[in-house]
Image (cartoon, helix red, strand yellow):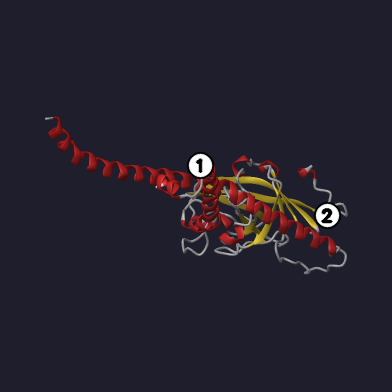
Amino acid sequence: MSRARRRAAAPPAGSRSVLAGFLSLLGEVLITLGLVLGLFVAYSLWWTNVLADRQAAARGEEIRRHWQEQAPEQAGPGALDTRGGIGFLHVPAMKNGEVLVKAGTAPDILDDGVAGYYTEPVKSALPWDEKGNFSLAAHRDGHGAKFHNIDKLKNGDAVVFETRDTWYVYKVFAELRQTSKYNTDVITPVPKQSGRTAPGRYITLTTCTPVYTSKYRYIVWGELVRTEKVDAKRTPPAELR
Amino acid sequence: MYGWIWRHLPGNAWVRALISLVLVLAVVFVLFQYVFPWAEPLLPFNDVTVDEGSGATP
């Protein structure tokens, strides 16, 4: 009797061990996938920032050195050098120091921890242009996350753009907290939905929203209130002190 | 899977633990250096620009 029971129990035990082996393999694979996804989050939200900040700091230093070598008096008008970047954006309300600004909004440009000005679909004006909209994009998360705190900007906050010779001081006057990613009207020379109807010297910051996703776009508009000449010590304007 | 790897590593437990650590670090390095940078643009988490939906810009 006991022998018969043992013999009867043997085949199920064998198939159970195959099943158990399969389940434990499945479990290990799932645990591994979970760890890999966790690592991917760490990569996206932390490591890309480390790389991008390092890259942007190196490029920024290069540009400042370049500016110093070329004293303002020597450079005539039109001596503007956009190689590597046109200047630095300072937004005190975002508390993220200076943001290097480069031409273009392609991923390989923005991924270096910079803000890019649009070259398409609507070509951005530049701060020194007579009229137009200086439109910028930067990452909300990862790759430097330069516009992470864009939601902290309120009307009246200062946005300062620094070039070799001039501080351009803008004041925020409108925002669009959520819009379609196809809404290219927000970066036109006279941005629709900003409330302005006449040409002026505007600045537009665009990034993605809500945080950690790319479903919509967050837009902030400002307009130029004054410019200040950069002095020998590069004293920042009152807004940045 | 991990049991199988552990059984096939040479040396005593300490050596095996050390080799395991090196293997884990190697995997993390490959992920951060090659796999994630490749996968990230394929995922819709980090598009920040407005565009006309042509796919020309992120």
Q: Considering depth in this image, is B29 or A100 the residue closer to the camera?
A: B29
The dot on residue A230 is 2
Q: Quadrant of residue A130?
A: bottom right
Say above or below: A38 vs B42.
above
Query: In the rendered structure, are the residues bearing label 1 and label 2 in contact, judged by CB atoms less than 8 Å apart?
Result: no
Q: The disc numbered 1 marks a residue on which chain? A: B
Q: Quadrant of the C terminus of chain A?
A: top right
Q: The disc numbered 2 marks a residue on which chain? A: A
Q: Position of residue A54 (x, y in %)?
A: 68, 53
Amino acid on which disc 1 is placed: Ala
Please tell me whether mark 1 sits on a helix, a strand or a loop. Answer: helix
Amino acid on which disc 2 is placed: Val
Q: Position of residue B47 (x, y in %)?
A: 52, 54
Say above or below: A75 vs A22.
below
Q: CA distance from mark 1 to mark 2?
A: 65 Å
The dot on residue B13 is 1
Horizontal side of residue B21 vs A199, given as left or right: left
Q: Residue furthest top?
A: A1
